[in-house]
Amino acid sequence: MDREALRRRDILEKVARRELSREEAMRLLKETAPGPRPVAPVAAHGGAGSRDIAIIGMSGQFPGAPDVERFWENLLEGRDSVTSIPKDRWDGDAFYDPDPRVPGRSTCNRGGFLSDVDRFDREFFGISPREAQLMDPQQRLFLQEAWRALEDAGYSDTALAERSCGVYVGFGWSDYRLAMAERDLVPEGYALGGISGAILAARIAYFLNLRGPALTVDTACSASLVAIHLACESLWSGTVRMALAAGVSLFMTPDVHVLASKMGMLSTDGRCKTFDDEANGFVPAEGVGVVVLKPLEDALADGDSIHAVIKATGINQDGKTNGITAPSAPSQLALETGVYTRFGIDPGTLGYVEAHGTGTKLGDPIEIQALSGAFSRFTDRKQFCAIGAVKTNIGHSIAAAGVAGVIKTALCLKHRRIPRSLHFHKPNRHIDFAQTPFYVPTETRDWPAEAGRPRRAAISSFGFSGTNAHLVLEEAPARKDGRPWPVHLALFSAKTESGLRRVLERFLAWLPEGLSERSLEDVTYTLQVGRSHFPVRCALVARDAAELKAQLQAVLRGEAVEGAGSANLESNPVPWDAARQSRGEALLAETAALAPDAETACRNGLLALKDLYLQGYALPWETLHHGGGRRRVSLPTYPFEGERYGLPGPHPSPMTGSAAHSVSPTPGSTPGGPIASAGKPVTERSAAPVLAAKAPPAAAAPKDDSRERLRKDLARLAAEVLKLEPRELDLRKPLSVYGFDSILFTELVGTLKRIYGVELDATVFFEHPTLLSFADHLHGLLPESALRGDTLPEPQAAIAEASAEPTRDAEATDLSQVPTEAPTDEPIAIVGMAGRFPQSLEVDAFWEHLLAGDDLVTEVPAERWDWRAYFGDPAKESGKTRVKWGGFIDDVDRFDALFFGISPKEAEVMDPQQRLFLETAWKAIEDSGHRTAELWGSRTGVFVGMAATDYPSVLARQGSPVVPQSVTGSSRSILPNRLSYLLNLRGPSEAVDTACSSALVALHRAVQALRRGECDQALVGGVHVMLDPDLFVIADKGGLLSPDGRSKTFDASANGYVRGEGVAVVVLKPLRKARKDGDTIHGLIRGVAINHGGRSTSLTAPNPVAQAEAMVEAYTEARIDPATVTYVEAMGTGTALGDPIELNALKKAFAELYRRWDHPPATQPHCGLGSVKTNIGHLEPASGMASLVKVLLSLRHGVLPATLHVRDVNPRIQLEGSPFYLNREARPWPHLRDAKGNVVPRRAGVNSFGYGGVNAHVVLEEYLPPPQRELARRSEPGVLVLSARDPERLRAYATLLRDALGRSAVPRAGASSEGLREDVAALCAELLGVDAAEVLADDSILGALLQRNVIGRLVERIEEKWDVSLLPSEFVGVEGLGALVERIARKRPQAVSAVRSEGLTPDDFASVLYTLQVGRDAHDERLALVASNASEAREGLDAWLRGQALPGRLYQGHRKRSAEALKALGAKAEAPALEDHLRHHHAAPVAEAWALGAEVDWSRWYAEDPPRRVPLPTYPFARTRYWAEAGTPHAPPAVLGTRAASAEGTRFTHKLSGEEFFVRDHVIQGQRLLPGAVSLELARAAAVELLGTATVRGLRQVSWRRPVVVDAPREVSLRFGGGEDGLDFEVAMDGEGAREHARGRLLLGTHRAAPAPIDVASVLSRCPDRKPGTAWYEALRQSGSDYGPSLRVIEELACGDHESIARLRLPDSLREHRQDFVLHPALMDGAFQSLAGLLRPGVFVYVPVALEELELFGPVPPDCYVRAEEVAAPLAEGLRTFHLQVLDLEGRHVARLRGLSVKPLERGLTRPAAPFYCERRWELSHAQTPEAVPDTKGPLLVFGPDAASVDRVRTHLEALRVDSTEVLFVRPGERFERIGRDVFTVAPGREEDFDRLLDALGEGRLPGRLLHLWSEPPVGTDAEDLEQQLLLGFYSVASLCRALASRKPKQRIQLLHAHASGRDGSEPLYAAVAGLLRTARMESPALALRSVELADAERPSLTAAPSLAVLLRELGSVDGQDVEIQYREGRRYVSSLGVLREKH
């Protein structure tokens, strides 16, 4: 008798003895049914044949197709299932606009949509109505389709329970949170899991009790094909034996349409025209598809239905391309070629390719190019392979696109037909199909097989994030039929009677066609073993299909028929009998043994079995078919009965919807917006009962009324919690059936306490799962007074409920079934790490906090949100939380965008998690001692654990506009992909979301990828940032959070976790590679395992058995003795239930591991337990990384930090008889020694469990390097090199390195406490007068030290050396060196990690130099220092930081700007000389050459013996703020004053007391004056108040008439008047002597793009005269300008010949309210003050009198630069004119002032000597213009307006003898394109086209001259004409200048913009062009930019011969200083400013 039979007998005997209930017995018997082979754990698959994976089940819903059958029909019919947007989603017309520039609208109002997405059979899955409504419909759809796919495969829930089946789901967009927020629904706890991407995959694993991994994958469009790839990998490795792989995509809001439209991705006509010449983008679509996978050899052996076979699969990443979302032909080619080569696939055998085929002009040709290249390496055949795309039928289903393609292709293989590809009429002009292996099928065609070869096809899927996937399918192998059977038993069941009717109806409809391809034997076999058997049943015994059909028809008519029967076991339960159960099992075997012709006996046997089935007996049906060769076949699946769970409230409109005011929904978002409080669903029940059900028997009368009343009350209360009617609850059923989980149990317990005054623990429902049993239990607890009458009882004293740990079926799992064999895989080395944690900018700071036992949890910082606004009791107030605590990291708004080449605009909409991950990954790479340049193009993988992003909520709250970068900025898949793109990494690039275990699951994925050879090294990280309070509210409502802000892991008072944030990244390599590369190895990964908890008490409840299984698997893989594991970093969330469960799992796992290693049970604790969450809180998806980093640091330093807040151990934690102890104080982490006395490396485990059920465990080991020969390095001069992007970063870097060298710390593997041991031995040896080696060899001689006359000296020396105070009495019992070391370490654990005071050895210092030379990227700003040791290096860096020169030792330069200096070195800087210097270690010449920009091969210095790479300070990124700002803030009332209406218009009045900071501290010539700068902000702020919107972009034509003297309180008024292009304003003094103060015009509209940043360092280098602000203020005071503290903002002012630059800093006293200003008065006055550098203070005080224009690009930051440049010579009246640029610290413009004129204020006067106005004047000028156009290095680019003008220009140029110069022509067009040998087109409004134009000239080649003639047509009068001229005449010039400047040209480039005027004079448009050119010249001096006007009475043509002659001569002029030039009547004039005297 086998094991299962024995167990069944044991169950039956317990029932007979009444030790087990019937229900429990039935459930257990189901679990003991013989399990199918495919899910038993086995070793990894080996040979090539075994790599084939069978698709054994599939299901899906797609647009126009509720199932795959209808999907296939639609494909065959060539149906386009794209429709207009359904009204139940959103108003498609309201969100549509054909103009892509209209904000909040999409240019596409069509899509592929699913029907009835709000329907869900929540009762089937045991989910409450409350939870169902809060579930993302994508979760609901996936649940149902996963069930259907498993049924299609022929597997029931009992066959899969507790088996190793993985779940892998591609999932991207989730906008359900936003849909709820739009309807103002209130947060509720269920939303936490309902919208979590991690829970999506976990739900089916929980429901079916699956124990394999459950992962959500987000790689954007390729997500589902990547999920299939990951599933195949897990099957190959043996991690699982069956897998579900899927993809799902739904759109509940218009956000995706709007965002994708803004990126130009969508087809405006709603058609996906793949490969067609009219292709114009894709159409968004929805879909859900699931495939069930299994190794082919297992599928064949188990008789599975096989739809198709996966022959090959692979993934890779694009790395660096033209843009992060741009496709890469080389990457696609490499992927496809690699897949074919690796799996031995000849693409010549492929008959069809399902292309990614998004239908874009760029993407389609790239895909064909890559495929053709891959095919060409194997075959030269042409047009033999069909290629199509399902997107032409249904649209682009994003995350489900890949699985849609797989299901389509599998159906093609199955039916042997290829459907036509729609909308293909004319091939894309960039695709020549005749020269490719492909043709596009335009008609549906048969698919014949080539002789002797199975049909094959390939599927591609490319994520817009850069992750590509490719897969090869083959048709299923032929199968033989099993033996026939004379009679058949068909079983049907459902959960409801209406459900059963639908089951029968669907089967009956399917029967005729279905049996044409399947035998009735296989059909009935599948119905028996491949379906779950529910309580409502029907069974039929039939001889053939005809009889079966007749029986079905009769049953559906309600007629009795022979051989048929039905039963409802819910309403009519049948008493169970053990003897009948045994008889049924015997009858199965007897019937199976009958001969095929024994029809009568067979029928009788089946009739008896039918009756047993209808009585509810669970029989092992496999026995009936033993040896029969049966196969599972695809049959109709369960007909779910859907209720509607849609969201109440109106649909979004453009004014209220998220698309108008927010950014993209984050893929896989969890927290962020208000979450719904679900009400009753809209119910649509139908279908009459299929069978006449008997009324349920009357319940036995209760013993007393109180018991019955209590039952009714409990039913009512439970129903209220569930949002059900009480009549819907069966008191005999477990509450979990209705969706009760830990959250609802907790809520019910709270209700019971409130009503009955009884204290209960939610775990009581584990012991009393039904309402019947719980009512009896509660009845016994309540006093009699509480049970009498109908009134509710008064609250009573709490009655404690003692509850044991939950008992569940899983507890019976035998850990011995976990595999005992693991593949022999080498350890994975961790060679780099970096991280940021609460109050810890670096991991070293993190370690110091851990050692000190710091609790780093704080109140929510004010810059995140005001916690007071959300503080309250969530039980009493909606939207409130009791939690105001968290672990927060600093500066999440800061980012060095320019370092990574990211524009400020994009940086502002980037999720801060993306930004943090980029910087931390860079630091981790540097920590590994390698340059990022080494990784360029490498097979480096990126794996990141992350969940949601709150940033879209922040952007929405601030009203930030939707920009094209919004979609990539908040996409989860982009986070790892962005790093891959920036560093051009070609390995896998994946985001992983399994909730709290995400980071360690990402680590598991990386280890797998390394061991399988998918990548050569990997970066693994986790990141989490909290920006929004919503998830605090939700989690607190769910009872998850600690109200007191303390994670009290293991403590009796544990009451929840504290949320925390952080980011960490580690660099992984195989150990052999790390050793070879000389890397520092922080630790080794010996084993890692993941699984899912399967079915536990609830979806979010932990499962200790599954946790234990994961640990056992990890240590089995690691192959290490569990007795050598001396620390485990626990998950330790700090919950009263979770902590004991985790510790029980640890005890269970280690007991099993001890057994396997033949160890007796542990008697003494030796393994510490701790949790970093007590220090920093729970970092959720990044928590695993925090734990990992903590353990790695502990390994490095040899100390176990304390676990905090453990005072009274949780009484449920029992560690006796286990290896574990709680590590409650910092202690040394000693080494163990083996039997031979050898040191055993420290070993540790790390736990991480996701709240959705995914568990992970990692086994870490300390790296002990093998003994190596001592290097004979002598102390000699070497070269220390440092570089950065700019001078400020270089100084910061030098400071960091100087301080690090001062600490003299170079970590060594295996040093830690061994170093302390050696230091203590040396000290003891010194006191004893012996050698330290003697003490280390034999520490028994230490006994002499403990004599009383020596011990005092020992105490003194220990205190001196380690700052440790010991008493002599503490030496009692110290018998050896180890005990003494332990005493010191206990007193001061930091001593363990302290470095010896002797400093760095020569070898250590050589490692420092070597790491800086070869392990850091060389940036432009460079510093090289010659030093022999660390002390010299530290002193040299310190000298440089002080500005001290060190000739011969210290060299500084710039890679580009020092090119001439490098050239001047001549041969000394060339390669041969440098190689000689390197070989002979001549440090100084190498240092000098490198600093000036030379490339140096440092390996030449070290020959064959390079030092180690060591961790050193990493790059100090700039801390620039990029954040969603709420537009331009309003000025405060203190500045704005009061508002009133008058006859003249709106008037603001401000009363000045003289005590305002800007008046009080502004004393000029002894009088308090209102600063002129204040009027700028006053006017701006008042306009914002007046207009109600922040639309002021600048000011123009400002003039100051008279200063305002505030010698007494007085009023100042501000009036506004109308204007065509702005708002005129006037500021005047009121009252006596009222006079005008200032006037000007406000410019309205959106801010213009800021000019390119200024190189501040370059400006500073040109301004050598530097003085501190104090010196300037003293000079100003002496000249009559006395500034008080508030206005003393200049920190430093530097001057040159014609320019100055000042650094301004807002005083601390003004910083608190700085957000109240945009043009802060103190800073703007400081900008005016900075002119002192050029005005040179003396006898005059200068005041502003006029400002031509101020352009505003953003609020002036509190720390900024102001650059000033004088633009005209001083006039006789003393007038001086300047241009000013206000810059942030990175050189970005925040404001630009042009034409600021100042004039001296006469002594004793309060106004300028003479008010004046300025006007533009034309002055006669002569240019040095040659007769012919001279040659230059680059070509001449001529921008001609049309083809005819280009031809005319070409002719004229030849006549003008320009034929010796290469001339290229550029015309305006729709896109960049080369249309002739020398003619290009570009789109005038598309910036990137100008970049592509310059690229087309050739690498490093730029034009020498450019002639811009696009302003040839006159400016029109209507808006359309004006817009066209703006594009041609202004924006094209701006784009051209930007493109040229970005190349940083070294030679001078002449650009001439030409325009013409007639008798009406110049057009205002061209004055704007001239202003643009002036600005561009200042920012890029190499560009000689001019605007030339040809003026005549009749407007001349620019392309006429005379005009061209003038323009070409001007273009060749050597006098390039003039910007605005006019030719009139044959003379040349230049523009200048003249002054008009005021007329009196």
Image (cartoon, grey):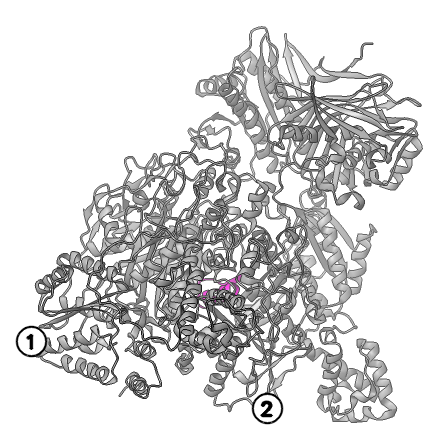
Mark 1 = which residue? 599
Specify the segment rendered in magenta. Answer: 998-1021
Q: Which residue is drawn at 31% across and 57% down?
A: 472
Residue 393, position as x, y percentages in the image: 29, 44
Please state which of residues 557 and 2040 is positioned toward the viewer in this rendering.
Answer: 557
Answer with the quarter of the image where residue 678 lies. Answer: bottom left
Residue 628, position as x, y percentages in the image: 16, 75
Answer with the quarter of the image where residue 292 lies. Answer: bottom left
Q: In this view, does 7 lie above or below 1686?
A: below
Answer with the quarter of the image where residue 431 lies. Answer: top left
Residue 58, position as x, y percentages in the image: 29, 59
Q: Is residue 335 visible?
A: no
Q: What crowding class fits label 2: few (fewer than 14 Cα within 10 Å), some (14-19), or many (20 or more)?
A: few
Please state which of residues 897 and 709 is positioned toward the viewer in this rendering.
Answer: 709
Please state which of residues 1076 and 1234 is positioned toward the viewer in this rendering.
Answer: 1234
Q: Can residue 1857 be found in the magenta stretch?
A: no
Q: Say whether residue 615 is left or right of residue 355.
A: left
Q: Can residue 193 be seen in this view?
A: yes
Q: What crowding class fits label 1: few (fewer than 14 Cα within 10 Å), some (14-19), or many (20 or more)?
A: some
Mark 2 = which residue? 1236
Q: Give, as a three-letter code, the residue at label 1.
A: Glu
Q: Is residue 716 above or below residue 1524?
A: below
Callout 2: helix, strand or loop?
loop
Q: Say whether residue 965 is left or right of residue 95.
A: right
Please state which of residues 1218 and 1423 is positioned toward the viewer in this rendering.
Answer: 1218
